[in-house]
Image (tube, helix red, strand yellow):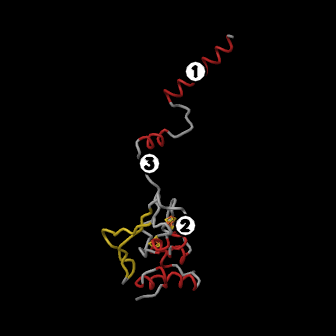
Amino acid sequence: MITFLRIMLTGAYKNIVRVLAKGDRATSIDMRNKILTLSVPPTPTVLDEMCIGCAGCYNVCPTDAITMVKLEKPVEIIEGYTKDQVPRIDLLKCIFCLNCHDTCPIYSVFGEAAPIHARDVGMPRMTLAEVLKKPIRAPPETIEALRELIPVESISLIKGEKK
Ligand code: SF4
Ligand code: SF4
């Protein structure tokens, strides 16, 4: 009986210490507080710096989850082509098919991580300027497929030609 009481009291004491001092919690107190205060930052789904604003992702999305938003300050990417919009994904409409990711010309053409991903775009490994200097590795049929998706003024960028 005494042993039983000792185990009970020890367990109760440990639980009280856990609750009050939060000393040996397995979960992150910091993350719990962020969840409770609705301040968990959303993971980025678009890398604005790498995106060329071609709207290819917008055109292939089967659920209309992507909206192209105008940039306050358009960015001249190369002579004759200025990026003036970037995509935003509505994750409530997204079905995570990754069409956008796989069709993004920065990924399709240059074989690097795409600037768009339905879950988490991850950390960029290169700047857009570095990506654009790389040799084009897309097969001709991919370039042709992209012609259907990308505005005429962007095609020279995809082919790496000067206007
Ligand atoms: S992953 Fe989502 S946002 Fe991208 S094309 Fe599919 S449904 Fe659209
Ligand atoms: S397809 Fe890629 S480069 Fe084109 S707008 Fe979408 S994210 Fe940007």
Going by the numbered disc 3, the residue's amino acid type is Val
Where is residue 100? Give x, y as percent.
51, 69
Q: Secondary structure at mark 2?
A: loop
- In the image, 136: left or right of 152? right
Whether label 3 lies within 8 Å of ligand 1 gets the answer no
Near mark 2 (Cα within 10 A), the count class, few <14, some 14-19 or many ≥20, is some
Q: CB atoms at circles 2 and 3 under 8 Å apart?
A: no
Where is residue 84? Give x, y as percent.
35, 73
Give the quarter of the image for residue 67: bottom left
Going by the numbered disc 2, the residue's amino acid type is Leu
Whether label 2 lies within 8 Å of ligand 1 gets the answer yes
Going by the numbered disc 1, the residue's amino acid type is Ala
What label does residue 12 carry, if any?
1
Q: Secondary structure at mark 3?
A: loop
**Which quarter of the image is occupied by the C terminus?**
bottom left
Which is nearer the eye, 44 or 128?
A: 44
- Label 1 or label 2, whichever lies nearer to me, is 2
What label does residue 39 carry, if any?
none
- Label 2 or label 3, whichever lies nearer to me, is 2
Q: Earlier in the sequence, mark 1 or mark 3?
A: 1
- Report the residue that reaches farthest toward the left: 72
Which is nearer the eye, 124 or 141?
A: 141
* Vertical relation: 7 (above or below) 157: above
**Which quarter of the image is occupied by the N terminus?**
top right
- In the image, 84: left or right of 41? left
- Kindly report the distance in space between the C-alpha atoms of the residues bearing marks 1 and 3: 33 Å
Q: Secondary structure at mark 1?
A: helix
What label does residue 40 carry, if any?
3
Residue where numbered disc 2 is placed: 98
Q: Earlier in the sequence, mark 1 or mark 2?
A: 1
Near mark 3 (Cα within 10 A), the count class, few <14, some 14-19 or many ≥20, is few
- In the image, 39: left or right of 114? left
